[in-house]
Image (cartoon, grey):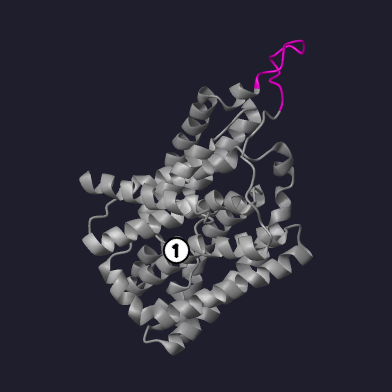
Amino acid sequence: MGNVLLTLAVGVAVGYLFFKLKFPGGLIVGAIIGVAALNITAQAASFPGLARTVAQITAGSFIGCSVSREDMKNLPRILKPLGILIAGYLVLNLGAGFLIYRISQMDLLTSLMCCVPGGMSDMPIIAADLGAKVPYVAVLQFVRMAVGVGCFPLIIAKVAGAKEPAAVSVPPAAPVPAVPASAPAEAPSKAKGPIVILLTMAVGSVFGFLGKATGIPAGTILFSTVSVLVYKLVWGRAFVPRWLKRTAQILTGCYIGCAFGRQELADLRYLVLPAAVLLGLYLINCFFMGWLLPRITHLNRAEAMLIATPAGASDMALISSDVGVDSPDVCFIQILRMIIVVVCFPNIVNLVVHLFG
């Protein structure tokens, strides 16, 4: 328990420092750096896996209560950018994997699994099942996740003209039918009061843990999002305050930082070139999608680059508003992208290895 509290204290302190410096995604980035430094220097970082689930539930609830009836009507329009994004990621995954295989000592399976843009906690486990070298996969997946969360939002904020958003709030969708028309309008504060927050988080938590129990990839955030969305559309009120979103960012950063220890640091010296190649190709893909998607879909440049950012769905859901993008399309595309990648890409990689390995 002492190490957990120390980890949390370091994550909060360094995360708050980065936040005050106005670094995009500063709470997550600062917590990752602080906890990773603690783990490397003192091997004293420890954080329960439950924290990741709590962060995903909070992110899912935050997404769900930001979606309106009009957004639901427009959901079919995300299919086109999603299809283009998945096709681009598949080409990138295979191309980068073969290139890393040629320039490193890794086998083809490990090289390809290092490039799969799935969850950092999921890919090493799947890699072990397939017979890849798990340490290499874990390190490169961590580097992808850390850079995706820490650097890509900063780049997007600079090149896409994003700006700090206003405070997020979710107004009532419509008056509850049972209330007479002559009744006075409900005070805005009640729509964001503690009871509304508790009910919103209760719905998100129950269904989030249910989603986790199903074993579906990204089930926690997916079930939380859908349940809070339905709850909001039916009940008319749902709200997740900004301070709760920031708490989730700290928890996420602490969890990720604990995965980085001395061995991972030592392994990086052998993976510098593969990591540079992979991150460079991801960055090129991010800029390419930022150029292509605004020309053929409804997404603007910042939204297109955010959906092409190789980070976790819950992480990007929490960070997107920090760079001035509050579009639910970005959040849902990231969630669907994660599900498709985790379910399909390892099987494609396995097939490619059997054909060409």
Instruction: Give the residue at the far bottom of this rendering.
Output: 102
Question: Quadrant where the N terminus lies?
Answer: top left
Q: Residue at x 27, y 44 (%)?
A: 5
* Residue picked out by circle 1: 146
Q: How many discs mark residues in the rendered view?
A: 1
Residue 280 drawn at (x, y percent): 54, 77
Three-letter amino acid code of the residue under disc 1: Ala
Q: Residue at x 64, y 51 (%)?
A: 324
Q: Residue at x 33, y 68 (%)?
A: 128
Residue 162 drawn at (x, y percent): 66, 57
**Does 177 appear above or below 202?**
above
Is residue 325 visible in the rendered image? The answer is yes
Residue 163 drawn at (x, y percent): 65, 53
Residue 311 drawn at (x, y percent): 51, 61
Indicate yes or no whether the magenta region holds residue 241: no
Indicate yes or no whether the magenta region holds residue 176: yes
In the depicted view, which residue is nearer to us: 347 or 251? 251
**Does 199 appear above or below 134?**
above
Mark 1 is surrounded, within 10 Å at the Cα level, by few (under 14), some (14 to 19) or many (20 or more) other residues, namely many
Left or right of 229, for residue 211: left
The picture quadrant where one finds residue 179 is top right
Instruction: Give the residue at the far front of this rendering.
Output: 21
Q: Residue at x 41, y 71 (%)?
A: 140
Q: Main secondary structure of the magenta part?
A: loop
Question: Quadrant where the C terminus lies?
Answer: bottom left
Is residue 357 visible in the rendered image? The answer is no
Left or right of 77, for residue 317: left
**Does 114 appear above or below 212?**
below
**Element under disc 1:** helix
Left or right of 310, for residue 168: right
The magenta span reads 174-187
